[in-house]
Image (cartoon, rainbow, N blue to C red):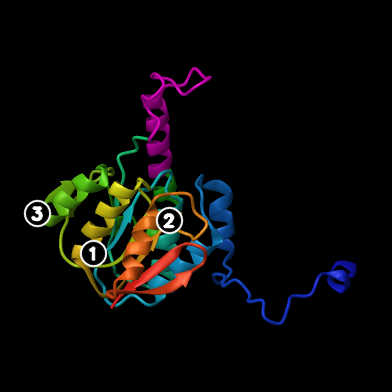
Amino acid sequence: MLKKLFAPRKKATEKETPKATHYDFVDWLQYANAGMMMEGNIYSFEYAINNLPSANPLIEIGSFCGLSTNLINFYLERKTAANLLFTSDKWEFENAGSGGSNIGGSHLSFDAYKEFVQSSFKRNLSFFSANRLEKTFPIELFSDEFFEEWNAASTLTDVFGKSAKLGGAISFAYIDGNHTYPFAKRDFENVDRWLEKGGFILFDDSGDDSTWEVRRVISEIKAGNRYEVIINNPNYLLRKK
C-alpha cells in the first residue's frame, strides 16, 4: 500500500507504453525458452496477427531457440488462424570462426553451439507449438537462400522432415536476421516483393535509439510513401499501403 501511495505520479502528457494482452502462457514460455524479446515486440506480434489482411503465410527471418516462433504461433492459435508460418535460419552466428573454432575462453566449439541451439529450437517448438507444428515450416537456410527458393516456388524439407511448398504472397514478416545495412536492406526488399497490401513487417532492433544499421533501412522506408508506421514501441511495425 505504501508503494502505491508514494509512487511518483505520471505527468499528464506522459503516455502509457502500449503492452500486449497479458497471458500467463507468455510468461511461462519466456521462463523456459531462451531468447531475447522486448515487450514491445510482443505487443506488435499481437497487433499484427489480430489484423492480418488474409490467410497468406507469415515469414520469420532469424529464429535462434524459437522464442519468437512460439510467440507468433501462440497468437495465431489464439486467433484460430489457418496461416502457415515459415522460418529462415541456418544457425550460423556472426562471430563463428572469427577467433578460432571455439567460443572465446571456453572449450565449446561453435559447431557444438549451433547443434545445441538448433536442437533447443526443435524441442521448444515441439513442446510449445505442438498444436501448430503441422503449419510451421522451419527452413535451414540463410535468408537470401530462403528467398531464392521462395521466388522459385520450390518444395523443400524443413528441419522436422516435413515437405514445405514455398512461394506466393505473405501477410506478415518478422525480420530479425543480420542487422547490418546490406543484409537488412535485402531482407526488406525480398519481403516487400511478396508482402500483400495491408501486410505487416516488424523489424527487430530498429528503434530510434538502436545502434544497429537496420535503422538506416527504416529511415529509407519512412522517407517513401508505400508504408505507414503502425507501432514504434521502440521497434518499428510497418504496414504496406
- Provide the residue designation for mark 2: 204
Q: Label 1: state its secondary structure.
A: helix
**Where 137 sits versus 48, above or below?**
above
Left or right: 4 as drawn, with respect to 35: right
Q: Amino acid at mark 2?
A: Asp
Callout 3–callout 2 Cβ contact below 8 Å: no
In the figure, residue 172 lies in which quadrant?
bottom left
Amino acid of disc 1: Asp
Q: CA distance from mark 3 to mark 1?
A: 16 Å
- Return the x and y of residue 161 as percentages of the image width and height: 23, 43
Q: Which residue reaches farthest bottom?
A: 12
- Separation of disc 1 and disc 2 at Cα? 16 Å
Is disc 1 surrounded by few (<14), some (14 to 19) or many (20+) residues within 10 Å? some
Answer whether residue 241 is visible to the viewer in this image: yes
Mark 3 — residue?
152
Quadrant (top left/top right/bottom left/bottom right) for the C terminus: bottom left
For marks 3 and 1 on the same chain, the one whose residue lies earlier in the sequence: 3
Which numbered dot is residue 192?
1
Residue displayed at 30% across by 39% down: 90
Q: Residues within 10 Å of mark 3 (few under 14, many from 20)?
A: few
